[in-house]
Image (cartoon, rainbow, N blue to C red):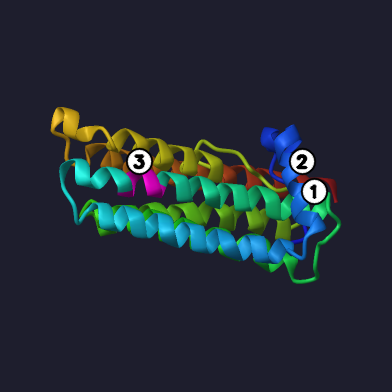
Amino acid sequence: MTETGDRRPLASRDTHWARSTAQWLASKSITPNQISQASMIAAALAGGAFFLSGQQAGWAQAPFFVAAALFCQLRLLCNLFDGMVAVEGGKGAADGPFWNEFPDRVADILILVGAGAGIGAPGLGWAAAAFAVLTAYVRELGRATGQPSDFSGPMAKQHRMATITGAAILSVFQPLWGGTNEILLAALWLIAVGAAFTALRRGRRLVAGLKSSGSRS
């Protein structure tokens, strides 16, 4: 991964623990691209945990929900540290832009489709994944046309992962009220609708930016 500018604004990037961890990783024979690739493994494990939760009932689902939540957060940590090791650690590579984007899109699909399959709503999982990918496509289309990256929400990557992680944690306790995956169902609907809105919002801002640029040329 090699991003030197136009980066997603993250408050966690400026924390002491993040800087220390990134420095430690940069001092090892670990490349940013390997960290990016590891995010796909974390996402596959999260999606698998969501799927396997659907094969259980009651409290037997709890360990899978906990695992899914942890692996979703591990995916985000990989996303954080690949950039920090590349930029702050000075270990960016020529093929970094590919590994910066491709694993993220794979991760979105694995997690959201796994969650949808786990609750018996694979179509909803695919819809959420498709709109998630579309938000990133519009952002990258903006960059390709000379516009700054648009990381706006309301359902950007960090918002999607916060939503699905929160839903997984709350679902641990659903046997207390006799729930049957309503929380995850609501979360996937929220992600799908929110990501669709985000893609449209970014698209509208992109068109406005292109028109503004054209009028000045």
Asked if residue 111 is among those painted magenta in the image, a careful observer would answer no
3 or 1: mark nearer the eye: 1
Badge 3 vs badge 1, beta-carbon distance below 8 Å: no
126 relative to 27 in the view: left or right? left
Give coordinates of residue 202: x percent, y percent.
58, 45
Q: Amino acid at mark 2?
A: Arg
Sort mark 3 into few (<14), some (14-19) or many (20+) by Cα contacts within 10 Å. Answer: many
Q: Nearer the viewer, residue 92 or 128?
A: 92
- Say the numbered circle drawn on residue 23: 1
Residue extending farthest to the top is 177
Quadrant hosting residue 92: bottom right
Q: Earlier in the sequence, mark 2 or mark 3?
A: 2
- Locate residue 49, reporting x and y percent: 34, 55
Q: Label 3: state its secondary structure.
A: helix
Residue 153 image position (x, y, % from top left)? 55, 38
Classify 10 Å Cα crowding around label 2: few (below 14), some (14-19), many (20 and above): some
The residue labelled by disc 2 is 19
Which numbered dot is residue 168?
3
Q: Amino acid at mark 1?
A: Gln
- Residue at 73% x, 63% y: name it: 30
**Prevailing secondary structure of the magenta residues:** helix
CA–CA distance between discs 1 and 2? 6 Å
Do labels 1 and 2 touch, CB within 8 Å?
yes
Residues in magenta, as a range: 64-68
The answer to whether 91 is drawn above or below residue 207 in the figure is below
Label 1 environment density (alpha carbons within 10 Å; few <14, some 14–19, many ≥20):
some
| Marks 2, 3: nearer the viewer | 2
Quadrant of the image occupied by residue 152? top right
Badge 3 or badge 1: first in the primary sequence? 1
Q: Residue 83 appears at what percent x and percent y?
A: 73, 52
Foreground residue, 28 or 102?
Answer: 28
